[in-house]
Amino acid sequence: MKFTISPIQLESRGIKDQKVLQAIRQIPRELFVPKNYREVAYTDRALPIDCGQTISQPFIVAYMTEKLQLKPSDKVLEIGTGSGFQTAVLAQLVKEVYTIEIYSELSQKAQKLLTQLGYQNIFYYQGDGNLGWPEKKEFEAIILTAASKQIPKTLLEQLKTTGKMILPLEINSGEQILYLIKKLPQGKGKLQSTPLLPVRFVPLL
């Protein structure tokens, strides 16, 4: 029997983008979690993976992806490859995904799995996500899957004008809020910042 993440489960929490829902339904999430967690792979909760990291709950993956309003022609930068689950969702929706992971073990494992699943539009880099993509490309969207105390300056420089960034920010005493950042055309470096909802992510290293 093939299990999937129910669209009803996500729609009941406000996810409306059918392309995002379909992308998540296509992914065998049990392959992205440790074997001892596969029985609960399709529950709407975060689960532990290697290196003390986590795979985000399906709702958060869907929510963050939906808020970026991605187009098929977009290039997206992901900070924190992790298990590769969010990467797989993005890869179904855009032209190219560039993903950075600080832990080599996670980066290699995700690349192996995503390649086996047939994704050919993902580019991988193992290193410090705060520094952005090494070739200094510009991206229509940037997504951070780890919490930062501030928006990394280099990432803002790699975000195209009118582009969007979504990330969890630690605002005080460990509290985290998910923010949507839009780079406005008027004025160099002008940003529109919108708080979305409280979240809990591992810290950005």
Image (cartoon, rainbow, N blue to C red):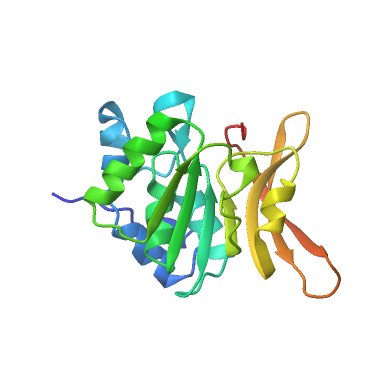
- Number of numbered tags placed on the structure image: 0
Image-quadrant location for residue 11: bottom left
Q: List x then y, in percent, for residue 87.
A: 42, 52
Image: 111 above or below 22: above
In percent of the image, x 84 and y 67: which residue is there?
A: 188
Find the residue positioned furthest to the right. 187
Please state if 88 lies on the left or on the right of 116 as rendered: right
Q: Nearer the viewer, residue 140 or 125?
A: 125
Residue 107: give x, y in percent of width and height.
Answer: 40, 38
Q: Please indicate, yes or no, whether residue 179 appears anywhere in the rendered image.
A: no
The reply, left or right, for residue 46 in relation to residue 92 is right
At x 65%, y 64%, the residue is: 164
Left or right: where does residue 179 sit relative to residue 101?
Answer: right
Residue at (71% x, 59% y) in the render? 181
Q: Is residue 102 shown to the viewer in this render?
A: yes
Q: Height in image: 80 above or below 140?
A: above
Quarter of the image that includes the C terminus: top right
Give the image location of residue 65, x and y in percent.
51, 60
Name the outermost residue toward the left: 1
Q: Is residue 126 rendered to the left or right of residue 84? A: right
Q: Is residue 104 above or below residue 130?
A: above
Q: Position of residue 155 (x, y in %)?
A: 67, 52
